[in-house]
Image: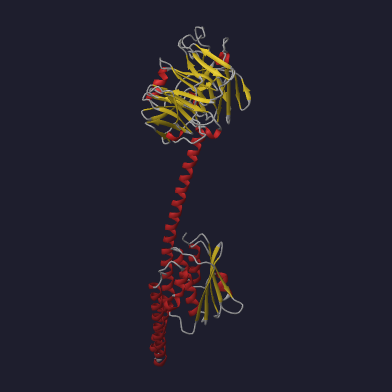
Amino acid sequence: MIGMISSDRAGGLWVSRLNGGLLRLYNGQWEMQNAKYGIQAGVTPRALAEDAQGRIWTDAGQTIGVFENGRRRDIKQDGPDIGRIGVLRAHGDELWAGAARGVSMRANERFQRLLGRSGERFEHTTGILLRPNGELWLGGRGGLTVVPAAELARWRADPAHAVAFERFGVLDGLRGSTEKTGGVSSVQSDARGRIWFATDRGVHWIDPDHIPRNPAAAPPAPSLLAVQVDDTAMPLSPHLRLPAGSRDLRVDYTAPALRVPERVRFRYRLDGVDDAWREAGTRRQALYSRLEPGSYRFRVIASDDAGTWSPQEASFNVTVLPAFWQTGWFALAMLALAGALVWLFVRWRVAIARLRVQRLYRARVGERERIARDLHDTLLQSVQALMLRIESSRRRLALGDAAGAEAGLVHALEEAESGLAEGRDRIRALRRDEAGVDDLETAVRALPAQLELPAGIAFALEVRGRPRRWRQPELGEVYRIVREALANATRHAHASRITVRITYALLHTLVEIEDDGCGIQDEVVVHGGSEGHWGLPGMRERAALCGGTLSVQALATGGTRVAVRLPRWRGFRR
């Protein structure tokens, strides 16, 4: 059974048999070409075509093969990429191929694929014909398609160009669809220039030079039918206002055409969204979703079956109202709020800096007051007592009591030495005033050596919780409180054991100093200190500077507990 027939310029006739095999009739002799060209037994070429150079082209599965100089060469790389080849057609130096996935043309040893407007790929092409005037006619399941010569020329120069085309189908009297049965093109022309097209319902022809067109003077003018917003019908108006939060806009339109209304095509655009016209084809509906607040203009035009677009258009204006958070005043309010927050943040930071400076200033003033108190408690009181002793000894000498005067002078010298020693202790304490580190534990461990505690006093440091890094001036103030408490326990309470306990809790930090000395009098605790002594008041002032509180308690077992409580957010580095 014969599948495909083609001739070559040498006078040979090529025949493809459906039961497999490729033959050539030359000088009255049949020659089997399978072994010569490496064709497997049972393989039947589906398409054959001779080009201007005398080469025979055939299908090779998903690509194309060529018979030349007794050899076969398959084009595997840079092939047509249109699937299984169904039809081949040579025209001058061009080789055209049609397949289920489109149409491709080979020129200058390269294939380029033909694409049409609106994404048309010319699939299931079974027939290819190039007329002498340059028009391209394609046959396929969609009907008979013609591409103008000017569009084809633009596509040859620019392979990315999507060609305009005209299609004839059922509305033009074409019946049936093409069913591919071999490699012969389903589109052919006769000597009179008519185009013949074969389908499963018969054979049709059309005279491309005498195609009847719409005699109307102008293409139909489009008109609007309905507008819906979120499935709610809206009244037609030249100025349509959509409520805030509208999501979907649907516009229905049409165009009057009495001859072939199904051939009327439409284009539409929404100014402000679309940069160019949208090809709607015969669809009479436009859809838009998620329109931003603003002003738009919808426009639609129509064309008749001759492809002439109407100069008139149907249009209306659309305004999408903004939600309150999309308005300008809301943006201004947010900007003002952001400015206010920045201003408050700056004020807060300035207030913190001012508070820190004030705290440092108060600490310096408090230190001067403490020094004044220390001088009053030591030097001034010692000098005053010394003066009283000397005055008493002078009076005894005047009364002739030499022994009493001598005893008074001895006591005066002892008090002078005691005051001098206490003054040295105070000066030494002042020179060792600063902790010098950023953690309280290290500073407290060094206190016994700095204060030169007697060897008989047992000192212990306990730390509970996760230690934190302190910052100045809080570290210095707490350090001075602990030092003052240790000095008091040594000098006044005569303690034999002193324990410092630092507790880092979730919301606060607690520093406790306990001793087993003689304790503290209740009236001193009630009044916050004793007359003429400034130790406890100074410790309270330092705790207040750190934002904390100081408590002094006499233990039931004897001894005293001094506790400083600070909030967690005061005095620590982040």
Image quadrant for the N terminus? top right
Q: Quadrant of residue 320?
A: top right
- Of residue 357 and residue 256, the one placed in the foreground of this image is 256
| Residue 429 x %, y % | 41, 74
Counting from the top left corner in percent of width and height, residue 137 is at 47, 19
Q: Is residue 9 left or right of residue 286?
A: left
Eyeballing the image, is 349 above or below 126?
below
Numbered disc total: 0
Q: Is residue 408 above or below residue 230?
A: below
Residue 175 image position (x, y, % from top left): 58, 17
In the depicted structure, whether residue 77 falls above or below residue 493: above
Q: Nearer the viewer, residue 171 or 413?
A: 171
Q: Inspect this view and state whether residue 485 appears.
A: yes
Q: As rendered, which of 488 and 26 lies closer to the eye?
A: 26
Left or right: 536 as drawn, with respect to 157: right
- Give the farthest residue toward the bottom: 403
Q: Is residue 314 visible?
A: no
Name the residue: 44% across, 58% down: 356
- Residue that extends furthest to the right in the rendered view of this protein: 232
Q: Nearer the viewer, residue 412 or 556?
A: 556
Q: Residue at x 38, y 80 (%)?
A: 420
Coloring basis for residues: secondary structure
| Residue 233 image point, x, y percent | 63, 22
